[in-house]
Image: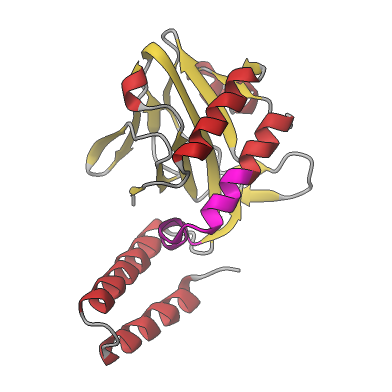
Amino acid sequence: MIVHIPNVLSQEQVTHCRDVMNRATWVDGRVTAGYQSSVVKDNRQLAEQSPEARELGEMIVAALERNPLFITAALPLRVFPPLFNRYEGGENFGAHLDNSIRQIPGTPFRIRTDVSATLFLSNPADYDGGELVIDDVYGAHSAKLPAGDMIVYPANSLHHVNAVTRGVRLASFFWVQSMVRDDGQRTLLFDLDMSINQINQALPNHPGVVGLTNCYHNLLRRFAEV
């Protein structure tokens, strides 16, 4: 399931992110890549433990906690601290899969990467290329979203980032361990929740909504690992 989540950050927050990132020191993006990914990765990142990454990451996590569409789509149990990358001058990231398990830096904890997320921080008109392309059984899906918007997709998807041939592409990326590890089950719950909301808007307080909501939570109880 691929979901576009608009307005995760306000334009003021996006501007603040870009200001902080433009003043920051960047390192080789391969520092967080696995062996196979490092062969095809050509970009730069903020150091994971840098003050800039910590500040912006905390702001993003706080925004995610207030975003009902993200909660519905990802059903998050744990969120990996957001990372930040930069592409320019032909930099790109070839086809790869994300690591299945991630160690949270500075802690003994690991998360299973069920859902991948990219939060766009540059305006699409400010750079050429840089599309995130996600492959699934239905083909290739290209995403180049407005600044402040985010896309979430199954972390087991083959994906790549096209070369940036003009301007600079700034983004945050991270992973989610979901309460529901199976993407098919998450999709079923997402579709049901969206339908419940639509019915409730069209027919406020209809008694059928209570029954459907009960089905949703009973399915969540069946599928969830907490």
Residue 21 location, quadrant: top right
* Residue sitting at x 38%, y 15%: 164
Q: Please state, as top left, top right, bottom left or bottom right, where the C terminus lies in the image.
A: bottom right
Indicate whether 112 appears above or below 128. Answer: below
**Can residue 133 be seen from the camera position used here?**
yes
Magenta-colored stretch includes residue 68: yes
Q: Is residue 164 above or below residue 201?
A: above
53 or 117: nearer the viewer:
53
* Residue range of the region highlighted in magenta in the rendering: 59-75
**Side of 1 relative to 225 (left or right):** left
Q: Residue at x 52, y 17 (%)?
A: 43
Q: Quadrant of residue 151?
A: top left
Q: Position of residue 187 (x, y in %)?
A: 34, 61
Q: Main secondary structure of the magenta part?
A: helix
| Vertical relation: 104 (above or below) 192 | above
Q: Is residue 112 visible?
A: no
User: Is residue 32 within the magenta segment?
Assistant: no
Residue 91 image point, x, y percent: 45, 13
Q: How is the image coloured?
A: secondary structure
